[in-house]
């Protein structure tokens, strides 16, 4: 699966499965955060029931045009501050803003594509999101301003419960796909520099959103031939499993049509 939207259309981010850890219905608790079933809200041990269980998580699923019934695989990261990013197999990319009341999820989205892949035939789109939380994920719709509807079905990945810490990301990471490559060096405090095969340079930082969960904020400046763009987004860390190396999965954009989806190893 590939998401494209980089410098001169040449910076492409391919991503593999966000799986390796499967889906889960019970969120792991750390510290004084109580575990409870996402759907019923019932307690697995003491403490008062919080008002809401958020839609935050790492997800895999599908986005299906209800008119054509054409579906695409998607991956998404939604942080517990309501900020989200999602990328689809057809190369489209979405910024999400979500809120949760009980099991009901609502919000808005803005979408970008380097080709006319949205239901209204345009390269940018926006609209509303409505979904219901289930024990293993969420199901709902994206409705654009023209009334076109896409069905969204997302499965939750339990890697989200691994927690986050900036020193975990420290080191040198590499990414390469379809002739595009990027090398990034991250310091223990989350600051990083990078360069890519398009002769662009990057300087930015990762930040903690909630140390209990595996979603990091990211912001960086990309400089290409004297042109500077500011990107923001989300990332998640996946530890090495068996013969597979550790991965850092990033979804970031400039909120104006440029975006990068990458899996660094």
Image (cartoon, helix red, strand yellow):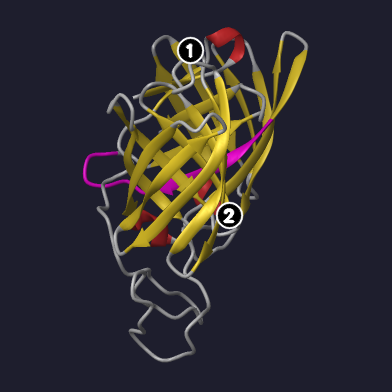
Please report the residue visible at 27 percent of the width from the left and 56 percent of the height from the top: 23
Count neighbours of disc 2 (C-alpha within 10 A) and say few if under 14, some if 14 to 19, many if 20 or more.
some
Q: Which residue is mark 2?
A: 82
Q: For this rendering, which residue is in front, 242 or 83?
A: 83
Residue tagged 1: 115
Q: Is residue 241 magenta?
A: yes
Number of numbered discs: 2
Q: Tell me how far mark 1 sits from mark 2, CA to CA.
A: 28 Å
Farthest residue in the left direction?
A: 242
Report the span colored magenta.
231-244
**From what the image shows, is residue 25 above or below residue 75?**
below
- Rendered view: 172 above or below 228: below
- Name the residue located 41 percent from the left edge and 44 percent from the top edge: 141
Quarter of the picture holding the N terminus: top left
Q: Is residue 193 magenta?
A: no
Residue 259 sits above or below residue 59 on the image: above
Q: Position of residue 48 (x, y in %)?
A: 49, 89
Does 135 sit left or right of 117 as displayed?
A: left
Label 1 or label 2, whichever comes before in sequence order: 2
90 relative to 210 in the view: left or right:
left
Residue drawn at x 60%, y 8% as measured from the top left:
8
Q: Residue at x 42, y 53 (%)?
A: 131
Q: At which x and y percent is residue 24?
A: 28, 61
Q: Is residue 260 left or right of residue 221?
A: left
């Amino acid at each position: 699966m590939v998401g494209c939207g980089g410098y001169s259309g040449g910076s492409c981010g391919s991503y593999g499965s966000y799986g390796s850890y499967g889906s889960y219905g019970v969120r792991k608790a750390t510290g004084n955060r109580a575990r409870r079933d996402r759907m019923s809200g019932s307690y697995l041990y003491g403490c008062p029931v919080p008002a809401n269980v958020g839609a935050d998580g790492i997800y895999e699923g599908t986005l299906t045009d209800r008119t054509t019934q054409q579906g695409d695989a998607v991956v998404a990261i939604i942080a517990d501050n309501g900020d989200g990013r999602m990328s689809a197999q057809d190369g489209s990319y979405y910024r999400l803003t979500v809120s949760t009341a009980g099991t009901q999820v609502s919000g808005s989205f803005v979408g970008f594509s380097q080709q006319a892949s949205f239901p209204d035939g345009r390269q940018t789109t926006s609209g509303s999101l409505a979904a219901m939380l289930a024990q293993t994920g969420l199901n709902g719709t994206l409705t654009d301003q023209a009334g076109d509807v896409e069905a969204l079905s997302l499965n939750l990945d339990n890697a989200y419960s691994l927690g986050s810490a900036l020193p975990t990301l420290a080191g040198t990471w590499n990414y390469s796909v379809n002739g595009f490559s990027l090398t990034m060096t991250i310091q223990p405090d989350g600051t990083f520099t990078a360069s890519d095969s398009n002769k662009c340079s990057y300087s930015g930082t990762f930040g903690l959103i909630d140390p209990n969960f595996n979603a990091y904020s990211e912001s960086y400046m990309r400089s290409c031939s004297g042109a500077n763009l500011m990107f923001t987004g989300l990332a998640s860390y996946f530890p090495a499993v068996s013969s597979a190396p550790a991965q850092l999965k990033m979804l970031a954009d400039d909120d104006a049509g440029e975006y990068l989806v990458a899996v660094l190893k």
